[in-house]
Each structure stands twice: as structure tokens, then as C-alpha cells.
Image: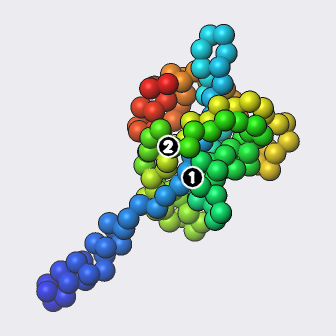
Amino acid sequence: MMHVLKRAWADVFLPMWQRPKRLQVAALCYREVPSGKQVLLITSRDTGRWIVPKGWPIDGLDGAGAALQEAWEEAGVSKADIESDPIGFYGYDKRLDGGLSTPVNAQVYLTRVRNLEDQYPEVNHRKRQWFTPAQAAQLVDEPDLREILLSL
């Protein structure tokens, strides 16, 4: 019996637990103001915690293009200059429909916002607000994202 349990652990349960992290893309939206940089955070749809706009890769778009699309849909960023290479990564557990979660690595693209719209696809589902990088770092839950914010 013990052999069966060890085999089940090694062949079934351990691979599910150690599944590879999925990839998302994130836009770290910022603007320059006289006092320095400000970053744009939004609330998540489910828990209301502060996050950066992010989502799954989009067919036909590179990482930066997909991150910019998420910034539009989730935060109303209609005009921006986005870096083509990510400035960093952070990991977190993404809650899926049905209550399950999956580990995710988010590629973060620095995005200089030139225009925000008042009407955008998720305007009724999220709040958005500008913060200093230090304030934003205190509000997010993910340690690696916190470090990226503090590096601004």
C-alpha cells in the first residue's frame, strides 16, 4: 500500500503541485509630475486589492502590445509610450474561476502614460488612482512588484 501511495505522489500529485508557472503581461503605467514620478494602480475585480493592469498574452501582439491592451481595458490608458523589453518580473497566484489558483509570472513593461480616458471597458469594475512609487509599493501584495516600484 505504501508503494502505491508513493507512486501516486510522485506520478500524480507532485507534478500538479510543481506545474510550470503561466505567463502574464503587465503594464507599469507612470507619468511625470513636478514632484517626480507617479504610478497608476487599479483595483482587482475580485478582491479590490491594488494591482497593475495585467492579463494573458494576446494572439497577434507581442508582450508590450498585450500589456498596452490590458492598460486600455483595465485602466483607460489610451495613449502611451511602452518599452519593448520588460523591466522585470513578479510572481503571484492567480485565482481562477471556480476558486482554484495557478502560479503566474508577470512580465512588467514600463509604460509612460500620455492620455487617460474617462470611459473604457472596465470602468465600472475597477478603481484607478495615481500614487508615488513608494506609496504604490506599500499597497501591492507581491514582493517582487514592490521592488520594481521602489526601483523607479
Height in image: 68 above or below 116?
below
Tell me if 6 is positioned left or right of 26 in this view.
left
Please give the name of the residue rendered at 60% of the width and 42% of the height, measured from the top-left corner: 27
Say which amino acid is labelled 1.
Gly
* Res 142 seen here: no
Residue at the spot of label 1: 63
Say which amino acid is labelled 2.
Pro
Which quarter of the rendered picture does the N terminus lie within?
bottom left
Tell me if 1 is positioned left or right of 80 in this view.
left
Please give the name of the residue rendered at 24% of the width and 77% of the height, measured from the top-left corner: 9
Q: For mark 1, give the secondary structure.
A: helix
Q: Are marks 1 and 2 in contact (CB under 8 Å)?
A: yes
CA separation, marks 1 and 2? 8 Å
Residue 85 in percent (x, y) is at 51, 43
Which numbered disc, 1 or 2, marks the residue that appears first in the sequence?
Answer: 1
Judge by depth and name the residue closer to the eye, 117 or 79. Answer: 79
Residue density around tag 2, few if under 14, some if 14–19, many if 20 or more, within 10 Å: some
Residue 151 in percent (x, y) is at 44, 26
Q: For mark 2, give the secondary structure.
A: loop
Please give the name of the residue rendered at 45% of the width and 25% of the height, measured from the top-left corner: 150
Height in image: 13 above or below 151?
below
Residue 109 in percent (x, y) is at 55, 41
Residue at the spot of label 2: 86
